[in-house]
């Protein structure tokens, strides 16, 4: 009986040590394998990103690095495979880019309930990428559900074009002049 209590106590201490290690485990981007890097957030709160570099042999290699992008509430998070699938993202994505926001199929997948409502890390990332493009992602998602073609047109026209290097003040005056009212018959 005493040995049974001792065995249970020993097992409890052993199991507790694993839980304590897991609770204190720190996620460091540079230590993550390349298949877990993209869409991970270090314990410091900074996003991890997959980068490429040329090895000494001239081969392209991948490494996980810490970005300067800080995420407030999701520190120490490695995105689940379920969310990666639900959101249509690829763990082999190199860097952080808003380019995929220009793809209608990706927007539809990102805006789906299984992604947008259940995967806050990916939703937060693309919310901020869209904001950088001057787009409010929840509004884009609403438009995507009702009129996908119109949503893409608005997304592509979200930024203002800057004048070219050859433009002069006279050209700018002409370009900004009001158009005459339409003539109705």
Image (spheres, rainbow, N blue to C red):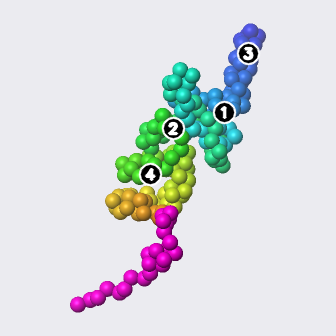
Q: Which secondary structure, mark 1?
A: loop
Residue at far left of view: 185
| Disc 2 target residue | 94
The span shown in magenta is: 162-185
Q: Which secondary structure, mark 4?
A: helix
Q: Quadrant of residue 66?
A: top right
Please give left or right for residue 156 compared with residue 73 in the image: left
| Disc 1 target residue | 28
Between the residue at mark 4 and the residue at mark 1, the CA separation in whole angstroms equals 28 Å
Between the residue at mark 3 and the residue at mark 1, the CA separation in whole angstroms equals 31 Å
Q: Is residue 113 visible?
A: no
Of tags 2 and 3, the one toward the viewer is 2
| Disc 3 target residue | 10
Up-down: is 32 above or below 119? above
| Disc 4 target residue | 101
Q: Is residue 8 magenta?
A: no
Sequence-earlier tag: 3 or 1: 3
């Amino acid at each position: 009986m005493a040995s049974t209590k001792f065995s249970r106590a020993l097992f409890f201490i052993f199991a507790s040590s694993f839980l304590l290690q897991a609770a204190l485990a720190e996620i460091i981007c540079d230590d993550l394998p390349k298949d877990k890097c993209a869409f991970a957030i270090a314990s410091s709160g900074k996003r991890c990103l997959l980068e490429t570099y040329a090895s000494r042999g001239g081969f392209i290699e991948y490494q996980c690095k810490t970005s300067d992008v800080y995420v407030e509430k999701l520190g120490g998070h490695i995105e689940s495979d379920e969310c990666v699938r639900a959101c249509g993202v690829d763990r082999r994505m190199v860097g952080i880019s808003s380019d995929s926001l220009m793809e209608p199929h990706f927007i539809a997948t990102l805006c789906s309930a299984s992604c947008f409502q259940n995967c806050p890390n990916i939703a937060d990332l693309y919310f901020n990428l869209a904001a950088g493009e001057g787009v409010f992602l929840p509004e884009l998602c609403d438009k995507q559900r009702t009129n996908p073609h119109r949503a893409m047109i608005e997304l592509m026209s979200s930024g203002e074009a800057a004048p070219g290097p050859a433009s002069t003040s006279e050209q700018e005056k002409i370009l900004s002049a009001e158009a005459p009212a339409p003539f109705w018959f």
